[in-house]
Image: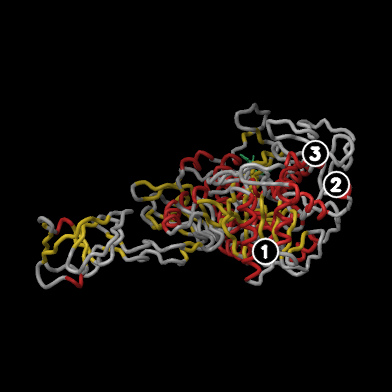
């Protein structure tokens, strides 16, 4: 197969003109032209659509590019229809017949009458049904009361659930689209004779291919985009054009290798996963299965070494999508964002005052006659200000021709038709140069940036309304332990409430990720296996708590070991028993300790930066501060220690107990004191490192 250079997707409509305002259930055209995604085009009626498609074919042919255009309606009818209608088992005989019969204008078309005419060629009631008009039509029924109508209900490609070609109207029906669509395609095919191949009926070695393909094949990707706002049809054509453009050539070839001489086929049927992956954007490769391996012979891994290993081995695992500014806060930029225009776009005034050409000033104090009119923000002055004259200008006004300098109104005495001011103003005073903030085409945001409110202002100012962002990292959370009860529920003897799941869910939410709550799982290997399977299917990373050591009931580590991609990280920190890191079906698992204090510390210190890498934001280092201690402590050498802490009056204090079961201490704390591996004595006033919890949130 010769590959294509450009890919378009058309969402057709059998209805009348849909008006000037872009809306759903109209005709939409999505295009990736030579690798560049264009904004979806709204086409309010079929004659505009026909011209737009013809224009596209002409442009791409002129540029020597090969073009694939997808349409979302069948190119053929169920076997036997063509012969019954035209005497020949040739789909194009049906195209010709329809083109000859259908008359179509933006306000009305005769598709129901044509269907009735077609019905007349078949035994019984004929195959078509449904009338979308008030008047009755002889030979066409309003409801499906057909009997003995000849051709089969469906094509081979049409699953039992989808609408049949015979239903001419009602939400989701395609019959009307076929009757109004095929005449247009037939005309285009003639107009570009020899250049267009209609798939799968014709030889594909032509520069333009018409292909039947349905956005429903990537329905869940469309749904996701739609949830972020915008018109469904626009997302459909944009994402399908993208999917087609990004399909690896062998996958596209495999999808096109179909024999269906009379009925046609839906391209991509049975390959939905590949289309979906392509529509979601660049999906990075999975992690290597040795990504959590530790150097051999190491017993206790120093925290920094553990972090360096994670940093080196983890990378972005999420795909990407486009969102509007309104849905972009907190999302991770996936592709460099460049200014579509400069900020400011034109030179303008920074103050309210009077503008003139600096070069036209004489020596000493000045008296300048005023020009009639004024320049205000959004209301520019049309004319040119002559040399030696001044114009009233307001803040934000574009500088008119003949003005390069503005004097502040407070520095001016205003007379009748003239102003006076002292000598000494500098050329260009009180003005802003075009592009002095951002030049057109400049990169304003780099991949990995987590979008802030100010970033959105910057995007808006330079004309960027949509952004390519990473899909949100989905984080599955599982608590393990026979002893766990759901907060608010009755407990059996020996049970405690599951404190980790609410804490970890909230934490993940604060990080800006999507929580997939998988509940609590008893100490049972099969139950845990099922939970991990779900996590791998529904999330990009799994956080478990409990069962991460090497004891009898430590099933997280046992299962990860069984899966062969587990490392038991004995990290030299306190609190924190071994952290179990592994992959479950290519999905990274952070097996956090069960103890809530240790779980939180390990989540912040290890899972936090790791998740930032996975999310596309890149490695993350929380900002710490060296501050005087308000406590004393003797520390043993060996492990790095984290103490629950908070700042008061410029000093850091620590919780009264280091007991690792004290959840109240976690709640009391506003951050952590980090004590280095070396031992020693801390006395009040010594400088220690304090990391506020807020430092862990966003970089
Ligand atoms: P484990 O790591 O499973 O041995 O658990 C260590 C300690 O943490 C035990 O005292 C558990 O009862 C406790 N623990 C485990 N999971 C939770 C949880 N989700 N909420 C509160 N405590 C827990
Ligand atoms: Mg346990």
Residue at 69% from the left image edge and 37% from the top image edge: 171
Asked whether, in this view, residue 22 is left or right of residue 252, the answer is left
Mark 2 lies on residue: 85
Task: Answer few, some or many: residues within 10 Å of disc 3's Cα (few below 14, many 20 plus, some between 14 and 19).
Answer: many
Residue 88, compared with residue 252, is above or below; it is above
Residue 371's quadrant in the figure?
bottom left
Residue at 75% from the left image edge and 47% from the top image edge: 101
Verify CB contact (< 8 Å) between mark 2 and mark 3. no
Q: Indicate the position of residue 31 as horizontal and vertical percent values.
A: 62, 59
Task: Answer few, some or many: residues within 10 Å of disc 1's Cα (few below 14, many 20 plus, some between 14 and 19).
Answer: some
The CA span between labels 2 and 3 is 12 Å
Residue 681 visible, this angle: no
The CA span between labels 3 and 1 is 68 Å
The one of 372 and 22 positioned closer to us in this rendering: 372
- For numbered disc 3, what is the local secondary structure? loop
Q: Is mark 3 within 8 Å of ligand 1?
A: no
Verify CB contact (< 8 Å) between mark 2 and mark 1. no
Q: Earlier in the sequence, mark 2 or mark 1?
A: 2
Asked whether, in this view, residue 167 is left or right of residue 630, the answer is right
Mark 3 lies on residue: 128
- Point out the frontmost of discs 3 and 1: 3
Asked whether, in this view, residue 556 is left or right of residue 421, the answer is right
- Point out the frontmost of discs 2 and 3: 2
Q: Earlier in the sequence, mark 3 or mark 1?
A: 3
- For numbered disc 2, what is the local secondary structure? helix
Residue at 10% from the left image edge and 55% from the top image edge: 416
The CA span between labels 2 and 1 is 72 Å
The one of 255 and 122 positioned closer to us in this rendering: 122
Q: Indicate the position of residue 532 as horizontal and vertical percent values.
A: 72, 47
Q: Indicate the position of residue 405 as horizontal and vertical percent values.
A: 23, 66
């Amino acid at each position: 197969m010769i590959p294509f250079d450009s890919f378009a997707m058309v969402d057709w409509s059998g209805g009348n003109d849909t008006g000037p305002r872009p809306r759903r259930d109209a005709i939409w055209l999505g295009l990736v032209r030579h690798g560049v995604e264009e904004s979806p085009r709204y086409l309010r009626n079929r004659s505009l659509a026909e011209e737009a498609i013809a224009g596209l074919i002409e442009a791409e042919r002129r540029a020597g590019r090969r073009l694939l255009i997808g349409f979302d309606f069948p190119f053929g009818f169920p076997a036997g229809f063509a012969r019954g209608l035209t005497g020949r088992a040739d789909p194009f005989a049906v195209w010709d017949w329809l083109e000859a019969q259908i008359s179509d204008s933006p306000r009305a078309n005769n598709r129901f009458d044509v269907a009735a005419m077609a019905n007349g060629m078949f035994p019984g009631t004929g195959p078509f049904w449904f009338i979308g008009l008030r008047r009755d039509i002889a030979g066409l029924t309003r409801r499906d009361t057909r009997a003995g109508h000849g051709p089969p209900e469906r094509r081979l490609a049409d699953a039992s659930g989808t609408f049949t070609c015979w239903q001419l109207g009602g939400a989701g029906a395609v019959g009307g689209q076929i009757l109004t669509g095929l005449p247009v395609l037939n005309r285009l095919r003639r107009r570009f004779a020899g250049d267009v191949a209609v798939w799968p009926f014709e030889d594909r070695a032509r520069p333009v291919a018409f292909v039947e393909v349905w956005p429903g094949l990537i329905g869940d990707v469309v749904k996701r985009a739609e949830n972020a706002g915008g018109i469904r049809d626009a997302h459909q054509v944009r994402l399908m054009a993208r999917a087609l453009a990004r399909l690896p050539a062998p996958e596209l070839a495999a999808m096109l290798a179909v024999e269906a001489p009379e009925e046609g086929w839906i391209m991509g049927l049975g390959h939905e996963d590949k289309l979906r992956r392509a529509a979601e954007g660049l999906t990075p490769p999975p992690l290597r299965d040795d990504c959590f391996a530790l150097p051999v012979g190491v017993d206790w891994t120093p925290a920094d070494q553990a972090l360096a290993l994670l940093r080196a081995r983890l990378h972005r695992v999420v795909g990407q999508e486009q969102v509007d500014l309104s849905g972009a806060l907190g999302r991770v930029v996936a592709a460099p964002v460049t200014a579509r225009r400069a900020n400011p776009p034109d030179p303008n005034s920074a103050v309210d005052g009077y503008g003139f050409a600096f070069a036209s000033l004489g020596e000493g104090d000045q008296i300048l006659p005023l020009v009639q009119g004024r320049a205000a923000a959004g209301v520019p002055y049309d004319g040119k200000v002559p040399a030696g004259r001044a114009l009233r200008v307001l803040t934000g006004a574009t500088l008119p021709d003949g003005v390069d300098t503005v004097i502040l109104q407070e520095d001016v005495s205003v007379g009748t038709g003239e102003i006076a001011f002292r000598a000494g103003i500098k050329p260009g005073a009180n003005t802003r140069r075009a592009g002095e903030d951002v030049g057109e085409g400049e990169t304003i945001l780099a991949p990995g940036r987590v979008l802030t409110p100010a970033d959105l202002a910057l995007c808006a100012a330079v004309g960027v309304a949509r952004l390519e962002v990473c899909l949100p990292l989905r984080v599955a959370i599982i608590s393990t332990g026979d002893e766990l009860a759901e907060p608010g529920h009755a407990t059996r003897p020996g049970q405690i409430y599951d404190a980790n799941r609410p804490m970890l869910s909230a934490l993940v939410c604060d990080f800006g990720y999507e929580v997939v709550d998988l509940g609590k799982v008893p100490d049972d290997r099969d139950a845990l296996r099922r939970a991990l399977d779900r996590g791998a299917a529904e999330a990009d990373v799994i956080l478990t708590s409990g069962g991460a050591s090497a004891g009898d009931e430590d099933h997280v580590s046992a299962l990860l070991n069984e899966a062969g991609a587990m490392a038991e990280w004995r990290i030299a920190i306190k609190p924190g028993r071994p952290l179990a890191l592994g992959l479950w079906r290519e999905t990274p698992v952070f097996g956090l300790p069960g103890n809530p204090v240790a779980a939180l510390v390990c989540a912040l210190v290890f899972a936090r930066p790791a998740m930032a890498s996975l999310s596309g934001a890149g490695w993350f280092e929380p900002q710490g501060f060296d501050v005087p201690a308000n406590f004393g402590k003797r520390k043993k050498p060996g492990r790095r220690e984290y103490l629950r802490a908070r700042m008061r009056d410029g000093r850091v204090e620590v919780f009264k107990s280091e007991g690792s079961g004290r959840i109240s201490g976690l709640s009391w704390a506003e951050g952590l004191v980090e004590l280095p591996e070396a031992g020693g004595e801390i006395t009040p006033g010594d400088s220690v490192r304090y990391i506020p919890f807020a430092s862990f949130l966003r970089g």
